[in-house]
Every structure is written in structure tokens, then in C-alpha cells.
Image: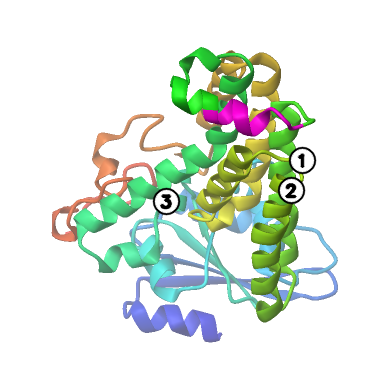
Amino acid sequence: KVNVTLLRKRLKTDKFKTENLSVGKYTETAVCVCYVQGIADRQVVAEVVSRLKSVKVDGVLDSSYLARYLDKEKTFLFRRVGSTEKPDVAVGKMLEGRVAVLVDGSPMALTLPYLYVEDLQSPGDYYENSVVTGVNRTLRLLSVFLSVLLPSLYVCLQMYNYQIIPFKFLITILYASDPIPFSPLSEMLLVLIIFDILREANFRMPSAVGITLSLVGAIVLGDAAVKAGLIGAPAVMIGALSGIGLFTMPEDTLILSLLRLGITFVGGIMGIKGVVLCIMALMLYMSSLSQYKTPFLAPFAPDVPRDRQDAVMQKPLPEQKYRPKSVPHENDRRR
């Protein structure tokens, strides 16, 4: 009731509708489907309600339990249901035609349908200048690409295509990597796994201890490993840059980390051709995803020019006259 009130406080209209359900055999958890009548697509609302009614489970303790059931295609690499704990974000998405799902006892609201481009967006983007917002989103996108591809490209260039590397830089890499007992692929995989272990340990430690753990792991262990000749300094630097870039999209950090490991492994075996094949396969897979009448990679695949007004670059809010075409809705005009 508190969460519904937070939404109703911002949507002072009788078009704000809710449908209450009870999910869970033993918990009988209250679930509320919220939408704006006249904007949200009726078929999408009916489908969300139908899927919630079909959930047969002992208990629902958090909204994340229902996210698995609302994902029709059961994708394992990318999340297909949006989540937010900010009422203004939830209302903003509802005004675009999306449906919000609230679960009793959970501070997170689920939003449907979901586009991958939403991961690039931050709530603060809509309170900043559109030029600054566009620059920030571009940096996030570049950071993700570099984080996922940088380790694999480093391994490929060192093992198969070293002639592409500038001569002076190549000498530096060879000098640093010559005493290393591991192959470039094994060395990079070891660095990435160590960073992932430190990240997981940091998340589960108290904040004060976590900062100390990060410093000890990044500085002491890294420096000791380089001096002992177990890991090369370039590999540590590449791993650190890749790890930092992943945190620009915190919701997908673990998924992107798994993709990074997989592409690095394939690149170490097949070279740059393997990296290119992995990218093509990943793009084809993501382009094939679609649910609730919304393509996952819209507005880029398929191409929806009008929706680029708030994708990577952002038009000033007064110029965004229409709602996103990628999200099904009944009322197209926003202003």
C-alpha cells in the first residue's frame, strides 16, 4: 500500500489503475499490477496479469521471484524485466506505456516491457542537460564494449596477430611477459578470475573491511604477483581496466563478466576470427529476443528512428513529442 501510494502521489489522475492479486500457496503475497489507462496497451496488461495468475509456487518473498515467471522466453544471459526502487522512474516508464508490478514487502518495482537500451540510462539523466546525458551514455556504452572485448583482443594480438601492435609497445609487452610461466590465455583468465573473486568477496564484506580488502587485493596481491613473475604487468592493467568498466552497468556486471571470460577463451583458441564470431553470435541472439510485443534491441534492431530520441543520445525533453514506438501503447502523443 505504501508503494502504491508513492505512485499515486505522482499520478494524480483517475486513469491510474491497479489490479490486485495474491500469489504464493503459503505466503499469499499481495501483488499489484499498476498502469495508466489509455496509455498502456490492454493486451500487454492482460498478458502480465494472466502470467501472474498462472504462477504456482509455495511462496513469493521478493519481486525478483516473479521476474523469472514474467520472462516468457526464460533467457539466461540477459535480464528481460526492468526493476527500480525509485517512484519517479516507475512513473516515467508507466507514462511511456509500460506496466509496473509491485510486491508486498519488496522495495523494487518490476517494469514491462523491457529494452536493453534501458541499461544505459540512469535516473539522473533526466535531470541533466541533454548534451551531458548523451556524453555520459556514450561513455557507458564504450566502457561496456571495451570491458568485454579488451582482454580477448589483448590475448589475440599477443598470441596470433602481434604484427599489428606498434613496435615499441610490442617490445614492452614481450619484456614484461617473457618471464611469465603461463601462456597469454592462461595468464589473462587467471587475472580475470582473481578480479571476479575479489569483487564477490568485496560485496559480501562489511563496508569498512571491503575497502581494505579491495586495496589489499588490487595493490598488494597484484604487485606481489608481478614481482614474483607469476603475472605480467600489462595483463594486470588490462584486467583492472576491464573490471572497472563493467561497473558502469552495475545491474549486468556478472553477466558481462561471464561473457568476457567466454569471449577471451574463444579468442585465445581461434584468434580475432573467434572474437568476431562471438560478437556476431551474440548480436544475432539478442536480436532474436522479443516479448510483450517489444524487440529486445529496439530501437536499433529493428531500426526505429523515432525512438532514438532517448536511446544513446537524448533530445531535449520539450522536443520528445511522441512516446517510444518500441513500447506498445494506445496514446501515441506525449505533448
Q: Amino acid at mark 1?
A: Leu
Q: Residue at x 62, y 42 (%)?
A: 233
Q: Which residues are magenta?
A: 172-180
Give the label, 3 or 1, closer to the camera: 1
Label 3 Cα neighbours within 10 Å, binned few <14 / some 14-19 / many ≥20 = some
Label 1 Cα neighbours within 10 Å, binned few <14 / some 14-19 / many ≥20 = some
The residue at which mark 2 appears reads as: 225
Point out which mark residue 34 bears.
none
Instruction: Specify which label sits upstream in the sequence, 1 or 2.
Output: 2
From the top left corner, tell me how far across and down residue 82 is, in percent: 53, 56
Q: Amino acid at mark 2?
A: Ala
Instruction: Specify which label sits upstream in the sequence, 3 or 1.
Output: 3
> How far apart, in angstroms, are the residues tagged by discs 3 and 2?
35 Å
The residue at which mark 3 appears reads as: 120
Instruction: Specify which label sits upstream in the sequence, 3 or 2.
Output: 3
> How far apart, in angstroms, are the residues tagged by discs 3 and 1?
37 Å
Q: Provide the secondary structure element on which disc 3 rests.
A: helix
From the top left corner, tell me how far across and down residue 263 is, in percent: 64, 29
Does residue 329 show up? no
The residue at which mark 1 appears reads as: 230
Judge from the rendering whether residue 76 lies leftward or rightward of residue 78; answer left or right: right
Q: Is residue 228 above or below residue 164?
A: below
- The answer to whether the residues at label 1 and label 2 have Cβ atoms under 8 Å apart is yes
